[in-house]
Image (cartoon, helix red, strand yellow):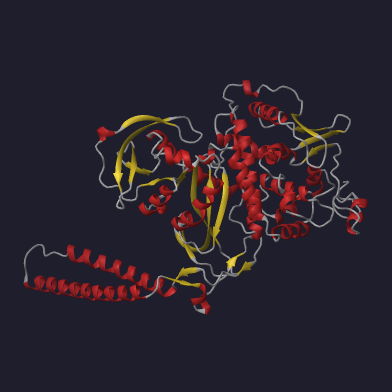
Amino acid sequence: MLDSEAAMGMGATDTLGRVMASVGMLGEAPVQFEAAMDVANGGVLLSLPALLANGLLQHTNKFFQLPAGYYGIASIFLLLAMMGLCRLKHPEALRYCAPGEWGKLLGLDRVPEVRTLRKKLKILSEQGQTPRWSAQLCEDWMTASAHDSSVLYVDGHVRVYHGEQTQLPRHYVARERLCLRATTDYWVNAMDGRPFFVINEAVDPGLLKVLSDKIVPRLLQEVPGQPSIQQLEDDRWLHRFTVVFDREGYSPDFFQQCWQTRVACLTYHKHPGPDWPVEEFIEQSVSVGQIPPQAMRLAERGVKLRNGLWVREVRKLSESGHQTSVLATDYRSDAAAIAAAMFARWTQENFFRYMREHFSLDRLIDYQTQPLAETTSVVNPHWRQLDGQVRCKVGLLQRKLSLFGRLQLEGDIEPERVERFERDKAELQQQIRELQTEIGELKLQRKAAPHHITVAQLPKDQRFTRLSTKSKDFIDTIKMIAYRAETAMALMLRERMTRLDDARTLLRTIYTTEADMVPNLSTGTLTIRLHHMANRAADTAVRHLCEELNATRTIFPATNLRVIYELVPGPQRADADTPGVSEPAGGGASA
């Protein structure tokens, strides 16, 4: 009722502050909490310690500035992160939320309107500081978890674009099994799936090119705890860190190039050859990701690649008899550790799936475009057309050859049947010769056409622009912080729960649960009392989470109030003691 009757609009009860801000007499509104009961989405405040620990506000004033106004930079960053955790996947979703309720979470009378929020986003993203901010956060994350940055996972995520602003190049989208207009993001993640940074490629040169030119050089500069030059000279098998990727990055020359800088590579063997004898495989205990150790039958050999580089080949024998081959230039770890690192790639795949589903990873923030550099190399459309014709003709030739081989004269030999058989055979043979001639001519034309040309050489009707990434890069960095914060909280809950999936499902419920907010200026505290969960087992897990969060002694930004978390006191329920009632089961994706 108070929000709806506000004189300056829904929830805008701070009339004096807004008037002062409108005439330039207020740099930003002070954060002031008032006692409130049953605040919608109040549970998202439990994420505050994790968000701050992951650097949400640590470098904001260093890289970003906002003009004087009612909403300060800390409030905007907190709002965006909490929106992500509450699964408000785009700024327009805030239009359908009670602004006063969300304002209470930030210590303000209300949150900004969508138009105002978009204006703030535009100012922040156009300052051009997002890459430096993201790089600083990546450095902090790697330094805080040096062990996690010793094994890094690299994979490309294809973001499909269905709009009409520009005609992007086509990419093969494995999850849809179609070639669609898209752009590619290359993500670098830790073994548990937590992201470090992302590189956008409007014109995708391929994983191998991005690894060689952008990712590995950057990692050489940023990965902490690398051995010194003297240590590398003293131990010829010592490596700096390990990069894990799929078969797309398989290249003996790239493996050798990386080993010259002492970077270890780990990938699947693209040409494994014949199976090894079953007697070579030995059962070993392998711990992959967050799941308990499991038994794997492993075997190992040394393999010399075509360029003379000796690598380790580790194979896993499945129950069906299939052998999965892994190549590694990590010469120090045992076979079980190599298998664990390779088969933990599912954590990055689950990261993509979880982020698409819950954080709307593929969604655009704005619809602006920006020109491509004229020197950017792209696939020659004429070469692509010729290549498509060659593939089509080769496929048709294979079918004709197969039909020619199956054509036989069976049964009684009669003059009419023999004549028809010879005629069909001659016609097929003639068609095969014509196709072989056409394929030869097309291959010569394809060979003569340049495979790649620059954007400036493209015909005018086939030139395209790239999607602007300024706002998206900014929001993606906020989403990375939110995901890392949620993961940290899930690991806390995991101490009282069986599955990580259940912990994430419970967290999504917590974020949207009502809470009471009780500030106490005399003691300098802000108590957040979360309402009860669906059952006693979930309440027990939440109490444990509150204890862990209270131990951080987090101060709410722009105040001197220490945040205290607790569960609303209530009658004890016996549902957890009832036979058949267990911990909450969730259907969330592993990540």
Left or right: residue 294 versus residue 468 is left
**Above or below for 134 versus 283:** below
Q: Which one is in front, 448 or 481?
A: 448
| Residue at x-position 51% and y-position 34% | 290
Where's the C terminus, which quadrant? top right
**For residue 50, what is the image quadrant?**
top right
**Above or below for 582 versus 140:** above
Q: Which one is in front, 265 or 459?
A: 265
Whole-percent x, y for residue 523 in the image: 86, 29
Left or right: residue 464 versus residue 429 is right
Q: Which one is in front, 388 or 481?
A: 481
Whole-percent x, y for residue 423 in the image: 14, 75
Query: Does the rendering let one see residue 110?
Result: yes
Q: Residue pushed farthest bottom?
A: 460
Whole-percent x, y for residue 173 in the image: 47, 58
Query: Does the rendering let one see residue 247?
Result: no
Left or right: residue 378 versus residue 64 is left
Whole-percent x, y for residue 517 in the image: 81, 35
**Above or below for 345 versus 210:** above
**Above or below for 577 versus 413:** above
Q: Which one is in front, 403 or 84?
A: 84
**For residue 502, what is the image quadrant?**
top right
| Total numbered labels placed on residues in the image | 0
| Residue at x-position 44% and y-position 73% | 381
